[in-house]
Every structure is written in C-alpha cells, then in structure tokens.
Image (cartoon, grey):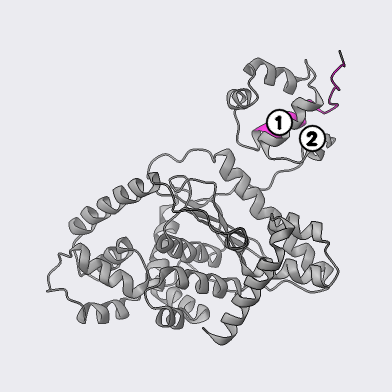
Amino acid sequence: MARSIVAQVEPAILEWARRTSGYSIEEAARKVDAEPEKITAWESGTQTLSMAQLRQLADIYDRPLAAFYLASPPKEPKALRDFRHMAKGVQQPPSPKLIAEMRQARYRRAVALDVYDQLNDKPPRFTLRADMNEDPVTVAARIRDVTRLDNIQNRRGGDARSVLASLRVSVEQLGLLVFQMSDVEVEEARGFSLTESSLPVIVLNAKDAVTARLFTLMHELAHLMLHDGGICDLGDNDVEVYCNAVAGNALVPADRLRQAVATSVHRGGTTWNDDELEDLAHRFAVSPEAIIRRLLDAGLTTQKAYQSKRDEYLKHYADTAKKKSRGAPSQPVLVLSRAGLSFARLVLEGYHQDRLTLSDVSDYLSVNLKHLPEIERQVTKRVLSLRTGV
C-alpha cells in the first residue's frame, strides 16, 4: 500500500490559518471529520498531517496551499471595528464567511493598487471629509452634492435598484471601491468599510433589501468621511447614531420630505398607515422603515408610532430572509454586482494594455473566461449609460 506524503509545514502556520479564518478547534475538527485532539496535535507539532489533509484544511480555511509553507505566521491586518448588522445585542466574533469576505475585499483593493501601478497611473484620492462637530444635515447636503443624488433620484424615480446602481458608481467616482458580498447572512452584517488613505472600500450585503443597501452605502460613506471605517462597534453609539443621521438626511432631506408629505394622501396627524409610508418610500427609493424614521426626526410622528412600525419591519425582514430567492442572476451580472464597475473596468484595462493575462482577469474577477465577452459588453453598456445619463 502506498504511503501518504507528509506535509512539511510549521505547526504555528496551521494554528494561524485556522484562527484567522474564524474557526475554533472544534469547528475545524467537524469540517475534517476528525476529533478535536487531532487538530490540536497538528497545531502543536506532536503529529504530522498528509498532503491530502493539508489540502482539505486549505479548502476549509479558504487559503492558498502556498500560504501554509510560510516560515512564520504573517502579520494580520488590524481587525475591522465597524459593520452594520440587523440585530441588537452582544456582537459575536465574525463568522468564517464574513472573515473570508473581509479578506477578499482587502485582496481586491491590493489588486487594484497593483494594476494602477502597472498602468503607470495613480489611484484616485478620496478627499471627502467630515467631523462629528458638524451638523449631520450639512454633511448630508455635501454628499448629495458630490454624488449628484438629487439628479439620480429624480431621473430614476422610485426604482430603488436603478438608484443603487447609479449611486454606487457616483460614490466610486469619489475615489473608493464598492463591492458586494453574497455569502454572509444579513443578521450578521449588512455591510462594512475599510478606511485607507488610498482607495478605501465599502462592502454591501447583496442578500439585503435594495433599499437597505442604499442606506448602508450612505452610512459607510459617512464612516469613511470621518476616517472611521471597520465593523460597527456597539459601544461606539455616538458614531453610529451620527452616521445614521447623515445617511437618513442624505437619502431623505427634511425639506423634500415635507414637500412630499404636503402632496401625499396623508390626512394629517402623527399616525401613518402602510400605504402612506409605502407611497413616500417609493418617492425617495428608500424603505418604509427609513421614511418612518425621517418622519420622527421631522416631528411628523411619535416615538411610540415609530417603534411600533419598526418592530413590524424587523419581523418582516426576518421572515423575508427565510424565503428562497427568485433565482440567481447570470454570471456576468453577478460578477459586476460583486466587483463593481470601477474594479471591473480597471482589470479589463490592465488586460487590454497587456499588463494582465487572461488568467489574471479570471482570478481577479472570479469568473470563467467564457463569460468575459459578456462582462465586457455589460461594462461598455454601463459606461455609456453613465455618459448619456440614460
């Protein structure tokens, strides 16, 4: 019987790979169908593992096989401190899936910087800043101005999906990248951001409602303007409240809300029914939850009425999340949804200027090369749409 090949790896690397992928010893043992003592023995160096077992761990930890042959564990990036999530309470450590999405966001940012360098070009600088001493209304007005949000909402009407697509591109043009993740549950994270001096990153959860993603985009943009990105620290309520206020005012300015209320079917008073809230929400391409919050901020409803409606919406979101999706989009649409227009354009430009290979493009966009012609067509179509304003 042939002997298995022993994997010559440092035990400390095995421990680092597991821990930084978000797995406990018990969870890793279940994944490889082994006793926890086996994982402990590998990580302590009292037992060796085979190449087949190492490949299995590499797959589980979502690490390239080469990473296990480092001489010592690399320095990990500073842990993210801020992400938007749905449920209140004690924040749990990030799941392996969320950790993988954080790593993917950092990887894509590094790829973008490298492509800019190969093209002998400098990445755009994100210079938009805010200070918590500023009135959130003032900061929100600045965001509406630089992103042309008035024009986007007027042009796209109540189509939240179109508003998100256009606003995402406008935000990227400020000198940052906007990605979407699809494997993380909304209850754990609605989004997060990476604050960097060059090419900061916002990541939205594609599983979330489109209107909720719009709010997350504005919320995380406010974090980056404060130079305070990461995963939401529940103890840092002042920053969270501030960013929520900026996002709410950016998407639904008080003056425009009052104008909309004046022309709505609302009969007056502080009580709002579902149809009235849906009507206002459609006008701004936001969620009814965002509208009832803005009505409270404007003194047009009560705290009791707001809380009652918000509890209804949270239950609705939880029930909706349990239902199956209507079906996956095409691969090219999915690629652009996750990577964003700016990143996809940059990678394609690198390829057309002979700085990247087809293999690079496949790796960076996480796509089978047979879909590349359609991805290029979609990118061209979206760029043309931006130029013509259609």
Q: Residue furthest bottom?
A: 388
What amino acid does circle 1 point to? Answer: Leu
- Position of residue 354 measured from the top left corner of the image (x, y, whole percent): 86, 69
Q: Quadrant of residue 46?
A: top right
- Residue positioned 15% across, 64% down in the render: 271
Residue 8 falls within the magenta-colored stretch: yes
Q: Residue 193: horizontal and vertical position, in percent?
A: 56, 57
What's the residue at 66%, 37% (across, down)? 20
Work out how far the residue at label 2 is from the one at label 1, CA to CA, in angstroms: 10 Å
Query: Circle 2 sits on which residue?
Result: 68
Secondary-structure class at tag 1: helix
Which of the pair 365/20 is nearer the observer?
365
Instruction: Specify the amino acid type for callout 2.
Output: Phe
At 83% across and 61% down in the image, what residue appears?
357
- Judged left or right of residue 164, residue 307 is left
Can you tell which quarter of the image residue 126 is in? bottom right
Coordinates of residue 140 in the picture (x, y in percent) = 43, 74
For this rendering, which residue is in front, 238 or 322?
322
**Residue 337 painted magenta:** no
- Badge 2 vs badge 1, beta-carbon distance below 8 Å: yes
Residue 238 screen position, x and y as percent: 41, 57
* 366 relative to 243 in the view: left or right: right
Residue 136 is left or right of residue 363, and the answer is left
Say if 343 sits above or below 101 in the image: below
Q: Which mark is first along the chain, 1 or 2?
A: 1
Figure quadrant of the N terminus: top right
Q: Which residue is mark 1?
A: 57
Magenta region, residue range: 2-18
